Image (tube, grey):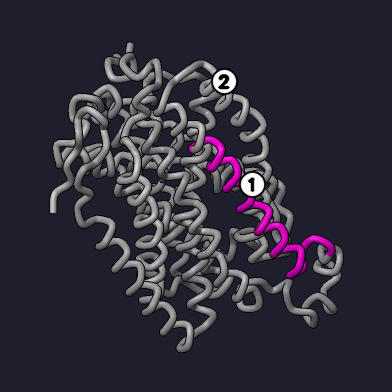
Amino acid sequence: MAIKLNNETYKLTEGGNLGKISLTIGIVGLALSLLGYFMDSKQFFHSYLTAFMFWTSIGLGGLFFVMIHHLTSATWSIVLRRLFENIMCALPVMAVLALPIIAGIGDLYHWSHHDAVASDHLLQDKAPYLNTTFFIIRMVGYFLIWFVLARLLYKTSLEQDTGSNKAHIAKMRKISAPGIILFAFTLTFASFDWLMSLDAHWYSTIFGAYVFAGGVVSMFSFTVLFVMYFKRNGILGKEVTVEHYHDLGKLIFTFVVFWGYMAFSQYFLIWYGNIPEETVWFLHRWQGSWKIFTLLIVFGHFGVPFFGLFPQDAKKNKIVLTTMALWVLLMHWVDLYWLVMPSLYHEGAHLSWMDLTTMLGVGGVYVWVFWRKVISQPLLPVNDPRLRNSMNFVNH
């Protein structure tokens, strides 16, 4: 069933089958993943963590950009703001989907074993921070902060739909100002907790920025795919123009460069320092078939989208932009796989069918929640006073 839009209210009158299909895929994927848990629990939890971080990072990218949008009073992105809001509003379901991570702490994190801590002075020093109770408390805190920020921003945005005034714009800006600071701290520490502590002997102060960059560029790629999905169904064809495609392409390009800068800086400083407890993390990722993944990340995550989106015309071409968006999302998964799996397979990569089922399971549920938000409210912030300017926006 095709989706249909009321051109006066900008609300979908028919939502199509995307939500049902996504939920079905999610349920089947999670069910198969649960079967995999009984076959190989360690593989399940590592595959699940990769999928969990992939979809959570996209939701966090949406929250980040909504706050940046309000803080900068951007005009061009108003026509896309509700889409970004829907992306961030799918975050609460990730709090529920985080339960398997808590259940798998023992399989995922070496520092959670008392005997390991007792025989390791470094883990003993880190025990006040790296312990199961505090880990769970922090996880709850992260999601609570993200939920409150997303809820306040979304609630105010919907209030603006019923009658716009300057107070709504000011309120969203006031929420975003402290919110962006809280976001920076929570994302950084969540990255430390969920990914970096997989190898508790290794540390990088730039790691949070690295994970942040990958999530934001993937969020923009996710946005591009749904903009093009609407376009193919004749939705928002006049409101979202080639100028908006151009800006989305520029943002993907920008954050690909930023991600590359973070990745190179992290590697270069550790290589230059040549301290064994730091370099061992990269040495593990240069052993066996991990070398292929490392090179794929260098040339695939950075090189391909950099040169693919470098020309101005490429950012305006729907086929090129869609292809690059799909490619960036694939590389984001490869990057997260490269971060997670060497803690399980030291000698080389070992792809599992659970890598696919966990991605489909978590992703299906995430997209279902996202789509429910899409069809429940107008696709545009209909009473934003600058909406018309956003529709007519032209890059200079």
Mark number displayed over residue 145: 1
Residue, far front: 162
- If the image is split into quadrants, where does the C terminus sit? top left
Looking at numbered disc 2 in the image, what kind of residue is underneath it?
Ala
Q: Position of residue 247 (x, y in %)?
A: 34, 26
Give the residue at x 45% y 51%.
90
- Looking at marks 1 and 2 on the same chain, the residue that comes earlier in the sequence is marked by 1
Q: Position of residue 330 (x, y in %)?
A: 35, 54
Q: Which residue is mark 2?
A: 170
Give the camera-side residue of 257 and 162. Answer: 162
Give the residue at x 38% y 25%.
78
Give the camera-side residue of 387 and 11. Answer: 11
Answer yes or no: is residue 75 visible: yes
- If the image is split into quadrants, where does the N terminus sit? bottom left
Q: Secondary structure at mark 1?
A: helix
Does 207 appear in magenta?
no
Q: Nearer the viewer, mark 1 or mark 2?
A: 2
Give the residue at x 42% y 52%.
332
Alpha-carbon span between mark 1 and mark 2: 20 Å
Q: Position of residue 108 (x, y in %)?
A: 61, 73
Give the camera-side residue of 209 and 137. Answer: 137
Specify the segment rendered in magenta: 128-154
